[in-house]
Amino acid sequence: MTKTADSKLSCPVSRMCGGCQWMGESYEKQLQKKQQRVQELLKGICPKVNPIVGMEGSPCHYRNKVHAAFAEDERGRIISGVYAQGTHRVIPVEECLIEDQRADQVIGVIRHLMEKFRIHPYDEDSGRGLMRHVLIRVGKMTGQMLVVLVIGNSHFPARAAFVQQLVKECPFITSVVVNLNGFKTSMVLGPSSRTVHGKGFIEDVLCGKRFGISPQSFYQINHAQTEKLYSLAVRYAGLTGNERLLDAYCGIGTIGLVAADHCKEVIGVELNKDAVQDAIRNARRNNAQNIRFFQGDAGQFIRGMAARKENLDVVMMDPPRAGSDEKFLKSVCTLKPERVVYVSCMPETLARDLKYLTKNGYRCVEATPVDMFPHTMHVETVVLLSREKADDYVRISVHTKDLKTSMN
Ligand code: SAH
């Protein structure tokens, strides 16, 4: 891959891979296009869209989570990479411009060790072979690395020797997990895992807090931009120390734990069991006494809060791409928190949900797009909404140039 004079990057497999849709554009142009997309979608819904918060320096190798599938080429050599779009045909990728570089190095070592130990890639159709995927997670601040070897058959010959050799060649690996996934599925991880080296998870430091992250839990993939995103979300929440805040779709509790220092009480809700367990441990890790986590559907959970007429000052919501649902949004409108901070990774579903909220007692104050995914078409946006009739509302205006990457 190369860097051209006008700051465009080029990758030899970008067309076949399809992961970085905007690789051929300069970074400035990419930011402009993302800004435009958010502005267009929020037109008539949000009166102010601030300039996008881009990545400083060279936006490369930012992905802290790396995944590769294994296959054999026509000559029977092990290859690893991504599936061609809409298929399970592996396109070989040895170096990726956006992935963590040490992770790519580890994948190269795994390919080499598979040859050495005569381990074949798993073939979904015949059910033969062993190694199916590898998933790598890196703690950008701690340097910790978790390698999840996903196998299609439960018998892993010479597993201990394989793992020992892997860790010997890549001593920065802090943990190795073997995950069994023999199902015909597009999910990378199967339901059963076994830790064969280290703790079975990694830790990272974000906004001054320490987080443990298990293989199945969600964790934002761009560390530097996540700090900016969370700082902005917490500022939008306008916390004075007296608030009761709901962190909905909370993952491992990151936003809630960052906000907990600035409010009275935080309640987190998350569907994924592993993530909730991580969140509870993360509260202990950071000695946070004013935060509790619940496992379940965010919509159902908040409906229960509304039925009990609980008091809520701020709702922080960060749903997956599909956005939230009417059950959730309706209960927000019943509970009437003063402010709603909506963090979204999909502007189309964001616009849909904002329309609902603005028809039901809220107004959008401002939005800021944040570039979490350089070289791709994806864009994150954080929006502040306020209750329409709140006359004690203090306008919180955040200028992107004032953003700090730390909450301290
Ligand atoms: N706020 C977190 C996680 C955001 S990703 C962070 O910044 O890291 C969205 C999260 O929503 C994922 O953890 C996913 O497991 C969770 N989720 C998806 N559907 C959900 C639902 N119906 N109810 C609660 N959580 C849900």
Image (spheres, helix red, strand yellow):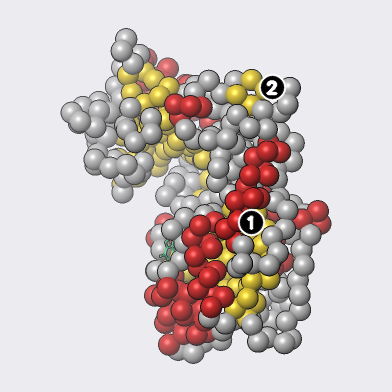
In the image, what residue occupies the spot 44% across and 26% down? 16
Say what amino acid the circle numbered 1 marks.
Gln
Q: Within the image, what quadrant is residue 186 found in?
A: top left
Give whichever of 89, 350 is nearer the camera.
350
SS assignment at label 2: loop
- The C terminus sits in image quarter: bottom right
Please report contact status of discs 1 and 2: CB closer than 8 Å, yes or no.
no
Give whichever of 355, 315 is nearer the camera.
355
Q: How crowded is mark 1: few (under 14 residues within 10 Å), some or many (20 or more)?
A: many
- Residue 39: assigned label: 1
First in sequence: mark 1 or mark 2?
2
Q: Within the image, what quadrant is residue 148 found in?
A: top left
**Above or below, 313 relative to 85:** below
- The N terminus sits in image quarter: top right
In the image, what residue occupies the spot 54% across and 63% down? 351
SS assignment at label 1: helix
Say what amino acid the circle numbered 2 marks.
Thr
Separation of disc 1 and disc 2 at Cα?
29 Å
Q: In this view, does 189 lie to the left or right of 38?
A: left
In the image, what residue occupies the spot 32% across and 10% down? 75
